[in-house]
Amino acid sequence: MPNSFGRHAVVIGAGMGGLAAAQALSSCFDKVTVLERDALPTIAEPRIGTPHCHQVHLLLRGGLEALSEFFPSIETALEEAGAVRIGVGSDMLVEAPGFDPFPQRDLGIDSLTMTRPLIELTVRRLVEQQANITIQAGCRVTSLLAAADWCAVTGVRYDLTDGESAELAADLVIDASSRGTLTMELLDRLNLPRPEQIEIGVDLAYATATFRMPRNAPLNWRAVFHRPSAASGRGGFLFPIEHHCWHVGLNGVHGEAPSDQLDEFIAFAAGLRTPTIHDAIKDAQAVGTIHRFNLPASVRRRFEGLQDFPQRLLVIGDAICRFNPAYGQGMTVAAQEARVLKRLLAARANEGQGLDGLAPAYFEAIQSVLAAPWSVAENDFIYGKTRGSCPRDFQQRMQFSAALQKVAAEDAAVHRLLAEVNHLLKSPSVLRDPKIVSKVQAVMAAA
């Protein structure tokens, strides 16, 4: 469906959401321009504009499958670049309260582990192969241009690294700039209400260190996911990454913060509920520095509730929903939102519809993508100090979840379904199958 919607689309930001969105738009516009404020590295290394890119990142299986719709060769490209393939149920040791560890079994699901810079570089190279997409680095977008009488975005204004400013006209603009500040400022200028904003104040502090994988690395696991208990709030991850290294992330909430000093970092690991991660890294060779990051709250903007929103403008990724990164959902959700956009544009093209009304249709369509990961983010209400409006059914949900874990530990089929839901491959509704609910209720009754 070439040129279905206009001559030119502009995407602000060359992160995961922006790159996937650009690919989604490429079949609908003559040209797509991605404007990125950072200088983009030619190798897999962190960039200034994404300080969190030093941290442990996980692209869930649902994210890989979404990106595969845009780039069929992406898994091969990632592995050739150094990503490590692991079995979700067999290679990953999951330590959860009451299950230290959870049973390991082959669930028939695998994923890839790697650093955030490697993911971005690989996806960016695939996007650059698209002839009508141009990525312009060193371009900091300062405002969205709009026709006030039409309440529609007409382009962007941006600053170049030499201090000069420029404007770029567009038929459609995608704000993939993480914070969504440009969109919020435009709503203010047009005297339009901002979306309702919901926050889950968890005060997450986390740090990531890199270690050489030792020759005597454990053989019974390749990755570790240590889920925190409500009592301590301390969690951790250990994933294999490129160059035969481990990425180790430790996190705490509400004042529990891992250090960026190696001895204190290892001591924090010793304070986890189990010694698995500590024992793995205590004698391992550290590589480079330890990087810390803080996230005060998960944030969800309810764009779908707005009665008025500027035409020819969409938002994607963290600007809509920013999740607790300990759950590893952000990149996957951004990729899935871009997939929703691609399918929505294809349907509108087939029906002869234009861009008018695209924003409300898009914001409504992505709710099915956001529902499950936001429900996971609400798990942070297990901590007594978490701020926000706790769901009324939270305790019932936690009781059901605890019993479901027990069922999954015994039943491989339920374990697989639970893994598919956790990797955003299937809706949580599959876990409400009457046969599963019956087993969960039996566990709850026996408690």
Image: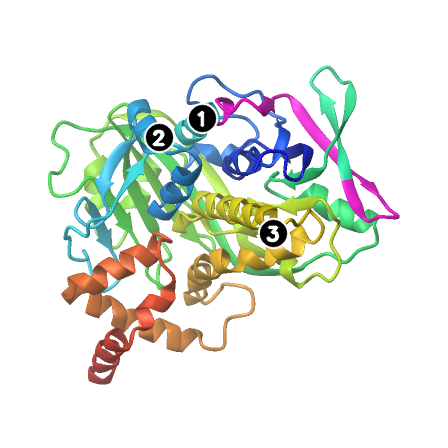
Q: Residue at x 59, y 41 (%)?
A: 178
Asked whether the viewer can see residue 228, the reply is no
153 or 380: which is nearer to us? 153
Instruction: Determine which residue is flagged by label 3.
Output: 351
Tell me the residue that label 2 is attached to: 73
Q: Is residue 213 left or right of residue 385?
A: left
The amino acid beneath tag 1 is Leu
Q: Which residue is located at x 83 percent, y 50 percent?
A: 190
The residue type indicated by label 3 comes to Glu
| Residue 126: mark in rendering | 1
Contact flag, marks 1 and 2 (Cβ < 8 Å): yes
Label 1: element kind: helix
Element type where label 2 sits in the image: loop
* Residue drawn at (32%, 74%) of the image: 400
N-terminal label among 1 and 2: 2
Measure how far apart labels 3 and 1 are at the Cα level. 30 Å
Within 10 Å of disc 2 (Cα), the crowding (few <14, some 14-19, many 20+) is few
Identify the image quadrant of residue 284.
top left
Q: Secondary structure at mark 3?
A: loop
Please determine whether, in this image, residue 291 is positioned above or below residue 388.
Answer: above
**Is 189 positioned to the left or the right of 63 in the image?**
right
Quadrant location of the N terminus in the rendered image = top right
Quadrant location of the C terminus in the rendered image: bottom left
Colouring chosen for the image of the structure: rainbow
Marks 1/2: CA–CA distance: 9 Å
